[in-house]
Amino acid sequence: MDGTTVYNWENNRASPSLNSTPKIIKFLGYTPPQPKTEKKTIGERLLIYRRIKGITQKELAKKLGVDPSTLARWERGRSTPLESSIKGITRFFKGLG
């Protein structure tokens, strides 16, 4: 990583790669503030979690017991989880804290 890369991140010209995010968080010693999650959709909250952890859709989908394409649709706002999936996602997030 060079100074240009960081400059581009700071000026919103590029975003860190998925596998770089956990390393950046570790370097900083904290997780940078995220947009308020209470006003986010479940898909947006899952996307934020996945990016912070630096995991792929396939990895998170496996943890949630859903197909990766289903998770992708949730994250993009193209569909919403069924009630049974919402319960599982809620348990997943509660298990983190």
Image (tube, grey):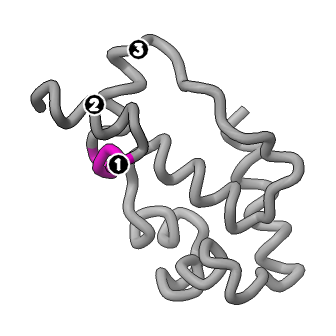
Q: Which residue is mark 2?
A: 7
Of pointers 3 and 1, the one earlier in the residue sequence: 1
Q: Which residue is mark 3?
A: 28
Depth check: give the residue in front, 95 or 33. Answer: 33
Callout 3 amino acid: Leu
Mark 1 crowd level (few <14, some 14–19, many ≥20, 10 Å Cα): few
Where 8 falls versus 60 (above or below)? above
Callout 1 amino acid: Arg
Callout 2 amino acid: Tyr
| Alpha-carbon span between mark 1 and mark 2 | 8 Å
Give the residues in magenta.
Answer: 13-19
Image quadrant where residue 21 sits:
top left
Depth check: give the residue in front, 30 or 5. Answer: 5
Mark 2 crowd level (few <14, some 14–19, many ≥20, 10 Å Cα): few
Residue 18 magenta: yes
Residue 13 tag number? 1
Mark 3 or mark 1: which is in front? 1
Depth check: give the residue in front, 78 or 22. Answer: 78
| Residue at x 63% of width, y 59% of height | 46
| Residue at x 44% of width, y 69% of height | 57
Residue 47: horizontal and vertical position, in percent?
58, 59
| Alpha-carbon span between mark 3 and mark 2 | 16 Å
Tell me if 9 is positioned left or right of 75 in this view: left
Q: Quadrant of the N terminus?
A: top left
